[in-house]
Amino acid sequence: MEIVIWLGFCAAVGYYANSKGRSAILWGLLAFVISPLLAGLALALMKDKDIQQDISQLRMNQQMMHDRISSNEKMNEARFSQVNAQLAQQQQNAQLAQQQNARLAQQQQQLAQQQLPQQSGTAAAQPVFCGNCGAQLEPGATFCAECGARVEGR
C-alpha cells in the first residue's frame, strides 16, 4: 500500500514537472529514487521553462518589431526628402514658367504696338484703281480682278 501512495506522489511530481516544461518521466524517476517531497520542492524552486521560452519569444518579436519600425522610419524619411525635392523642383519650374509667360506676354504686347502704326498707315493709304478699266484694286494686288490687266508700279 505504501508503494502505491509513493508511486502516486511520483506521478504527481511528473505531472507537475510536465506543466513546468520539464520531462515528466525523468522527474518521476527522480522522485521515485530520492523522494517525491524533495523532488517536488526542487521542482517548485526551478523556473518555468515554458514561461522563459515565451519571454524570449516576446523579446525576439519585440526586437524584430523595433528593427522594422526603424527601417520604416528611414524609408519614410528618404521618401519625405524625395517628395520635398520634387516639390521644390515643381515650384521652381512653375516660377520659371510664370517668368517665361510674362516675357512672352510682354513681347506680344510690343509686337502688337509695333503692328498698330503699320496697320493705321495702310488703312490711311488711298485706294488704288486699275488704269485699264478703273475698278478699285485690293491692296497688294498685281493684277486687276475685273479685266486681268497687270497693275503698273507694283
Image (cartoon, helix red, strand yellow):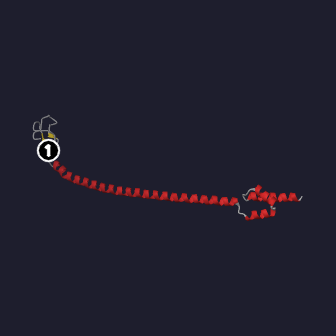
Identified at 84% across, 57% down, the residue is 7
Q: x%, y% of residue 132?
A: 10, 36
Q: x%, y% of residue 80?
A: 45, 58
Identified at 25% across, 54% down, the residue is 107
Q: Tell how many labels.
A: 1
Mark 1 falls on what kind of element? loop
Q: Quadrant of residue 133?
A: top left
Q: Residues within 10 Å of mark 1 (few under 14, many from 20)?
A: few
Along the viewing direction, whichever of 109 and 4 lies nearer the viewer? 4
In what quadrant of the picture does the N terminus appear? bottom right
Q: In this view, does 58 lie to the left or right of 91?
A: right
Along the viewing direction, whichever of 123 and 141 lies nearer the viewer? 141
Mark 1 residue type:
Pro
Identified at 39% across, 58% down, the residue is 88
Question: Circle 1 is placed at which residue position?
Answer: 127
Identified at 82% across, 60% down, the residue is 9
Along the viewing direction, whichever of 85 and 128 lies nearer the viewer? 85
Q: In this view, does 104 lie to the left or right of 80?
A: left
